[in-house]
Image (tube, helix red, strand yellow):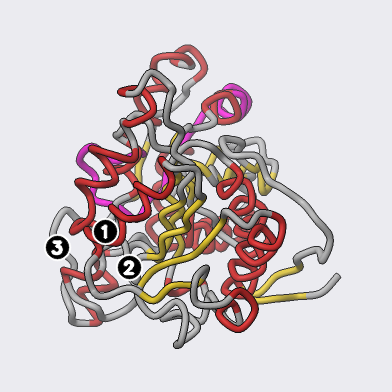
Amino acid sequence: MRVIQFRQAIAEAMSEEMRKDEKVFLLGEEVAEYNGAYKASQGMLDEFGEKRVIDTPIAELGFAGIATGAAMNGLKPIVEFMTFNFSLVAIDQIINSAAKIRQMSDGQFQMPIVFRGPTASAGQLGAQHSQAFESWFANCPGLKVVVPSNPYDAKGLLKAAIRDNDPIIFMESEQMYGDKCEVPEGEYIIPIGVADVVQEGTDVTLVSFGKIMKKVNEAAELLAKEGISAEVIDLRTVRPIDYETILTSVKKTNRLVVVEEAWPLASLSTEIAYHVQKYAFDYIDAPVKRVCTADVPMAYAPNLVEEFLPQVSKIVEEVKSVMYVK
């Protein structure tokens, strides 16, 4: 099987769906002439032309609104934000229009739209360009929120998102666009709302999503060398959350550590911890632990960036704490 980059998997998913359905189109800043800020739309302008791959002004509220109106009228737009930090400019259209119009119209309008782009930190980008908004969007009924961790999942999930009749928030990472893995050349779809048990284990359940999965997988390898068997779950979708897979695992391992690149208050890890204590309380042999970012805006200095983000050492430390070992 061939090995391709994350950015190529994204481009392939969009291109394949655009070939299948002429109603699908892409718009956003630098998606056409420049082939995307992260080259995730490489070659698409040449193939589909300027009416289906559209460069927009630096006006997120404007082009998110145009895309929302297009979706209401039967088209299937893909909106690329250069970063989800900039989606805050467009959040009124996303939350008050795209997420709500199906219910407000009693189903007369569907909303087949995908808002995609990178989320969270990407090195020394400072406080305004390093924020993770997965939990913000997941808080809103009417949206589905997808956060793939690798090229294989990204392609299968994005194709599913484009075919969906509900608005999808599809969150990537600038630091993953160069990641590589095996991706089939043939057609495949990964259903939205189904988690992936990346590794089976018996001692503790590790739950995460997105690029932090790389640190979780590394931590699981280190724990295995110390005789601790971790079951690793990649959520892939954070609205809806696959609670059943999490509960099944916790009932087996009796311990849970949730890892998330987000501020701790009102985070997705908070919701998961609540759900597990409600529905699996009798199975838990230790307090549910979370590994989140520091509860401050992200700094610019490299040493402070290191302190801010979840690290492998902290994941290992928290696992050992629920195992009651040093």
In the image: residue 10, left or right of residue 54: right
Residue lying farthest to the left in this orientation: 296
Contact between marks 1 and 2 (CB within 8 A): the answer is yes
Contact between marks 3 and 2 (CB within 8 A): the answer is no
Residue in the image at 31% along x and 43% along y: 137
Can you tell which quarter of the image residue 231 is in?
Answer: top right
In this rendering, is residue 286 above or below 163? Answer: above
Look at mark 2 in the image and give the residue it sits on: 83
Q: Residues within 10 Å of mark 3 (few under 14, many from 20)?
A: some
* Residue 47 x/y as whole percent: 65, 78
Amino acid on which the number 2 mark rests in the picture: Thr
In this rendering, is residue 149 above or below 146? Answer: below
* Separation (CA) of disc 1 from disc 2: 7 Å
Amino acid on which the number 1 mark rests in the picture: Ser
Q: Which of the two residues, 135 or 321, is positioned nearer the viewer here?
A: 135
Mark closer to the chain start, 3 or 2: 2
Look at mark 3 in the image and give the residue it sits on: 297
* Residue 249 x/y as whole percent: 61, 29
In the image: residue 51, left or right of residue 298: right
Q: Residues within 10 Å of mark 2 (few under 14, many from 20)?
A: many
Amino acid on which the number 3 mark rests in the picture: Pro
Disc number at residue 4?
Answer: none
In this rendering, is residue 78 above or below 248? Answer: below
Which segment is the magenta one? 248-269
Residue in the image at 82% along x and 66% along y: 185
Contact between marks 1 and 3 (CB within 8 A): the answer is no
